[in-house]
Image (spheres, rainbow, N blue to C red):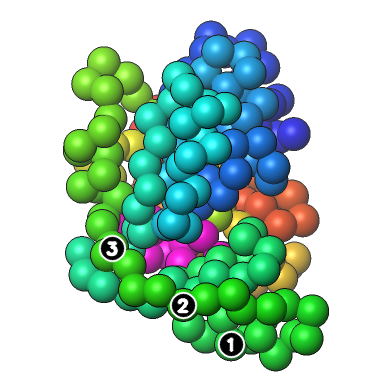
Amino acid sequence: MLLRKIFENSKPGFYVDVGAHHPQKFSNTYYFYKRNWIGINIDAAPGSMKQFNILRKRDINVEAAVSNEAGELTFYMFEEPALNTLDKDLAKQRLAEKKNKLTGEIKVQTETLADILTEHMPSNREIDFLSVDVEGFDLEVLTSNDWQKFRPKFVVVECFGKGKFEEIISDNTYIFLSAMNYSLYAKTINTCIFKDNLKK
């Protein structure tokens, strides 16, 4: 809802959604797609882009695991795909809850966000907002970007369990984005929105 408010008077823009999961369900970008925005959707789950290619045909849809370096990691897949993660410790925590069931583990090749954007970002566009929702791997995604070359106006990240301001400002994601010259613009229960200090 906050993103809608931020861009309510804007012309159709461009988004990047890392951990896009589903073209409609739990999507931070579908609302904007319906209003003639376009963007890049990225998700590591095998076959995840099949539905995107049907329901989000104007978008650039990329099946890829994003990390701070190219390599190989284990991708943990759950019965509820929204819980899928590259974070081994988070996967263990979720398995400790009996309601969460693991359906598989696969090895995936990782790419940096900078490399993906270099390959797929249209040269005539700038990023209005970057949404990162990769279940415990947000910082790895953020640190893998080239912040000189690809600089979103707003960055949207998860901030579960960080209700107090002191908890937010001591979080590594906050510290990193502050170092990139972004400031905390708004917060909901589970989401923090950062704004680029270099853009008005």
**Span highlighted in magenta in the image:** 134-146
The residue positioned 57% from the left and 80% from the top of the image is 91
- Disc 2 target residue: 105
The label on residue 110 is: 3
Q: Position of residue 22 (x, y in %)?
A: 60, 44
Q: Quote the CA–CA distance across marks 1 and 3.
A: 21 Å
Q: Secondary structure at mark 1?
A: helix
Quadrant of the image containing the N terminus: top right
Pointer 2: residues within 10 angstroms few (<14), some, or many (20+)?
some
Q: Quadrant of residue 74?
A: bottom left
The local secondary structure at tag 3 comes to strand
Residue pictured at 46% horizontal, 50% vertical: 47
Q: Is residue 74 above or below residue 148?
A: below
Q: Position of residue 5 (x, y in %)?
A: 70, 25
Residue occupying the point 26% across, 44% down: 116
The residue at which mark 1 appears reads as: 92
Depth check: give the residue in front, 53 or 176: 53
Observer-side mark, 3 or 2, equals 2
Give the camera-side residue of 73 and 117. 73
Q: Is residue 167 above or below residue 112?
A: below
Q: Is residue 91 left or right of residue 75?
A: right
First of labels 3, 2 by sequence position: 2
Query: Relative to residue 162, is residue 153 depicted above or below?
Result: above
Quadrant containing the C terminus in the rendered view: top left
